[in-house]
Amino acid sequence: MCGIVGYVGGQEAREVLIDGLKRLEYRGYDSAGLALGSGKDLLIIKEVGKVEDLERMLQKVPAGYHQGIGHTRWATHGGVSQANAHPHKDGKGQFALVHNGIIENFSELREELERKGVVFLSETDTEAIVHLVATSFSRTGDILETLVYLQKRLRGTFALALMQQGLPDRIYTIRRGSPLVLGSGNGEAFCASDIPAFLPYTRRIQYPEEGDIAEISPGGIRIWDEKGRPVERSVVTVDWDVSMTEKSGFSHYMLKEIHEQGTVLRRSLKGRVVDGKTMISGELGWNVEMVSKWKKVHIVACGSSYYSALVAERLLEKWTDLEIKVDIASEYRYRHVACDPTTLAVFVSQSGETADTLAALRKARAAGAHCLAITNVRGSTLAREVHSVLLLKAGPEIGVAATKSFTGQLAALFLVALQLGSMRGILAPHEEERLVNELIRIPYKVELLLEKDGEIKEIARKYAQNKNMLFIGRGMSFPVAQEGALKLKEVSYIHAEALAAGEMKHGPIALLEPGVPVLAVIPKDSLYEKTLSNIQEIKARNASLIAVCTEGDRFVPEQAGSVIETPWTDEEFTPFLSVIPLQLLSFHIALILGREIDQPRNLAKSVTVE
Ligand code: AGP
């Protein structure tokens, strides 16, 4: 979704802003722009296309602008055009504004402003905001009063950054429902939709709360709540460093992030499992009394995060006595689910900003559930609105396709399931110890598997030209097949469908024909023989088969045209390993097809609108 960055300080603002916008490109966008202030003038430059195009346009602009706001736009209201790109300004060119989010009452506001003679130059909802700022400021002459008034008038979600002509050392922001972080350095300050935008300059972060208004200036950051009362928001020093946001010698972020998974898993487990025991209850603020009151677990998420939740569902069924329900956030939020104080509601989201997941959380929280966030972003909206948080230790994920965050989520969900099982007395200590001991071996096994990158690249050559692909799996491997199909769709644009292997003969088997390969996820687990029969049915219809199976399997290689073997592990852990070849296969197919792998068409990294 849209990306925002703002800067005031001693550096040339356009350099900091272009750098920041490039670091936000992963969010997905179709146009980009920035406003620069020098005290004398307020300059707006914007265009359809890439940040690099904007950078070229800026070469003509002289130096001396030390204040600015930048934006990458992902069109919602109004088509992709120069006029609709941000920043937007008021009629007199006194204010410039960038916005991420959706203003739900914008038609009403636009009509009201037009009745007063305001002329709109774009079709966006954002333009109504800047005109509202200008008309209110002309009445009050007070920017804080104007921003408090603005909050009363706007319905919907927004993160805004605003600058005013003649005020070269101030930028104002408001955050309600859309992500925004503030950063302070030495004699300079920043605002952005996400931390990587200004990570090269500062790691000192403040997270504004819902409705907060902030003034960022070289002297520091001042914050007020939505009513205009001064508030303090703590400064956090993030442990991300700038190398985490770079490609570090890899051709693509996706490939780099796939290869980071061993490290991510090691980091995720460090200090959380000790001597064969799970030790996250302190981090979560859970005690036995609390945990014993729960009767149900709801896990809610979108996309890849939902597939990791489906793996967790199977673990929780095994290791706890709780009633488990897993749902897609956009469905859950509108269903009549029985959620109450006996429910543990778990929300899984890499970004912690997915609009549907946040709406589902608010619904569960209002129903009295204990809410847990599993997220990669400390300080994200999700992390701030729940009762407990378990952070992924994945570091920033820049590629739009989730890879390391998926395995990071699996690790976090594993820990939650183990912790619940042991605290409720269902998982015997010796069983927990066996599971923990295998869990800590998984990062090493993932790294062994990553060495098969070259082999998987060769397999990708054989299948890159197909228009369709089916993915099948059973039990723990069904969500893996679903994640594999999603990865292939996202980055290669090949149509892919995932099916529970046992469902094939209830209809989808009719799809089999030359050119529709089937990828089977078939580790040596308790359902192995069942899946093997399904494979035989597929082979009997002459479909080509790719198999992801366990090393040493004698039967599957006889059936499959291509085989990728994974190291042996216990059934529960197979998703950690089986998903790796699927990620690599999607990456290499997309590379052969010349796709924009890190920023696939039409996609945004975090979906902050419904
Ligand atoms: C995964 O590859 C996708 N980009 C997408 O499905 C993603 O998992 C989904 O949008 C949820 O995002 P979140 O984890 O940040 O909530």
Image (tube, rainbow, N blue to C red):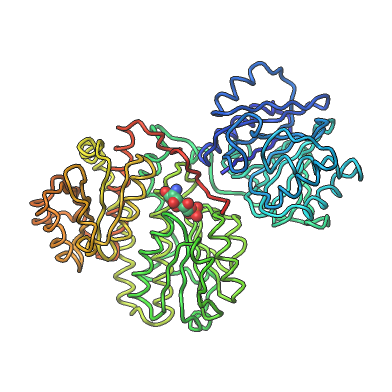
Whether residue 527 is visible here, answered yes or no, is: yes
Side of 137 relative to 494 (left or right): right
Residue pictured at 23% horizontal, 60% vertical: 507
Q: How many marks can you see?
A: 0
Q: Nearer the viewer, residue 337 or 307?
A: 337
| Residue 488 pos. (x, y %) | 33, 45
**Residue found at x 61% / y 55%:** 379
Q: Nearer the viewer, residue 276 or 139?
A: 139
- Give the image location of residue 585, x and y in percent: 28, 43
Q: Quadrant of the C terminus?
A: bottom right
Picture quadrant where residue 428 is located = bottom left
Quadrant holding the N terminus:
top right
Toward the viewer: 229 or 302?
302
Residue pictured at 21% horizontal, 40% vertical:
459
Along the horizontal axis of the image, is 222 left or right of 543? right
Residue 194: give x, y in percent of width and height: 59, 45
Q: In the drawing, does residue 586 fall left or right of residue 364? A: left
Residue 479 x %, y %: 33, 60
The image quarter in which residue 44 lies:
top right
Decide if residue 250 is in sight here. Answer: no
